[in-house]
Image: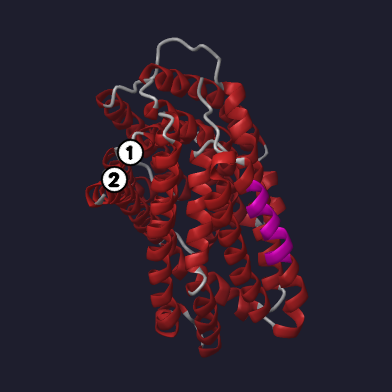
Amino acid sequence: MSFRLNKELREVLTTSLPLVFVELVASLYSLTDTYFVSGLGTEALAALGVALYVFMFLSSFLALFLTPLLIMVSQSIGARRVELARSIITELLVVGGVYTSILGFTSFTFSEHLVIVVSSLKGITLRYTVEYLKIRCLGLLVLYVTMAFDMAIISTGKTLYTLIANTTGLALNVVLDPLLIYGYCGLPRLGVLGAAIATVISNMVTISLQLALLRRLGLTPSRTVLFTAWRKALKLGIPALVERLVFATGNVTYAGIIARLGDSVMAAHNIGLRVESLIYMPGFAFTQTASTIVGRRVGRGDIDDAKSAGWKVIKLGSVVMGLLGIFIGVTGYYLAAPFSPSETVRELVSLYLALAGFSEFGLGLAMITSGAIRGAGNTKIPFYINASSLALVRVTISLILADPLGPLGPWLAMFLDVYVRGVVLAVIYKKQFYKIVHIVIS
C-alpha cells in the first residue's frame, strides 16, 4: 500500500511541478514584457494593459476545442490507443484551426471597435492598443496550435517536455522584445508593435519544438483527418466555453461593483489581485494534473483508481494553495508596501489579502476538483456549479453588502463564493463520481 501511495504521489509531483515552473516563467515573462514596454511611456503601458485584457477575453473562446482535446487525448492514452489520440489531435487541429482563423480574422477586422467598447481610450493610446491587438489577432491561429500541442503533451503526463518547450519560447520572447521594441542590432524600432510581433514569432518557434517533442512521444499528428471526433469535442467544449464567458462577464460585473467604491478601493483590489496571482500558479498546475491523471485512468477503464488518484491530487493541491494563502494572509500588510501609493491603499490591500489568503484552500478545492471532473469526461457539472455560485453568491451578495460594508462586502462575497464552489464540487466528486464519469472515446 505504501509503495502505491508513494508511486501515486510521485506521479502527481512529476506531473504538476513542471507545470508550476511553466506558470512561474510565464509570470516572470509578463513582468519583463511590461518592463520593456514601460520604456515607451505611460501611453504605451496603458495600451498594453487594455490590449491584453481584450486578447485574454478572445483567447477564452479557444476553450471550445482545447478543453476537449486534453480530455479526449488523456483518455485515449490511458486506453493505450495512441493512433486514436493522434487522430483526435489532427482533427481538432483542423476543425479548431478553421474556427480560430475565423475568430482571429473577425477580431482583426473589428479590433478598434472592441477596444472602444471596453475602454475610453483616445489618441495615441488607442492607436497603440489597436496596433498591438491586430498583430495578436493575426497570430491567434499560431497561439491555438501551440496551446493544442501543449494540451497534447500534458495529456501524456510528460510535463517536463511542456516546461522545455514553453521556457524556450518565453526566453526567446524576452530576447526579441528589446530588439523589436527599440530597434537594436540594426532592426527597425517598432515600439508596441514589436512586442506583439515578438510574441507571435516566439509561439512559432515553440510549435517547431513541440512537434519534435510530440514525435518523441509518438503523438505526431496523423496525415489523414477522419472527422469523427468533433461532435464529441463540441459536447465537451461548449459547457467549458460558456463557463469561461460567464466568468468573464461575472468578473467584469464584480469589478464594476468594486470600482464604484472609489479609486483607492479599486487600486487596492488590483494590487491584491497581482500579489494573489502568485498562488494561482500551483492552482493551475494541479488543475491540469488532475485532468490528465483522472482522464488516463478513466480511459483505461479503471474508475476506482481514477477517483482515488484524482482525490489525492485535489487534497495535495488544495493544501499547498491553502498554506501559501495563509502566508499571504498573515503577511499581507508587508507585501502590500512596495505597491501601495498611500497608507490608505496599503491597509485596504492588507484587508483584501487577509480574506483572499484564507480563501485559497476553497479556491484550490474548486479549481482542482473542477479539473478532475473534466478529466472524467464531464464538463457540465463544473459549469453548472461554478457559474451558479459566481452569479448567486459572489455577484448577488456583493450588490447587497457593498453599500453597508464598503469593500469588505464584495471581498466577503468572494470568500464565500470560493468555499461554496469548492465544498459543493468536492461533495459531488466524493459522492457521485461513478454517476458523472463519462468515457468519451469509442
- The image's mark for residue 11 is 2
Q: How many marks?
A: 2
Q: Position of residue 356 (x, y in %)?
A: 52, 72
The image shows residue 368, relative to residue 215, as above or below, that is below
The image shows residue 70, relative to residue 127, as above or below, that is above
Q: Residue furthest left?
A: 3
Secondary structure mainly formed by the magenta segment: helix
Q: Nearer the viewer, residue 288 or 279?
A: 288
Q: Position of residue 62 (x, y in %)?
A: 56, 37
One can see residue 344 in this view: yes
Q: Residue at x 70, y 45 (%)?
A: 113
Quadrant for residue 60, please give it.
top right
Q: Residue at x 34, y 54 (%)?
A: 20
- The image's mark for residue 80 is none
Check if residue 384 falls in the magenta segment. Answer: yes
Q: Nearer the viewer, residue 102 or 238?
A: 238
Q: Secondary structure at mark 1?
A: loop
Give the side of residue 247 with respect to residue 349, left or right. right
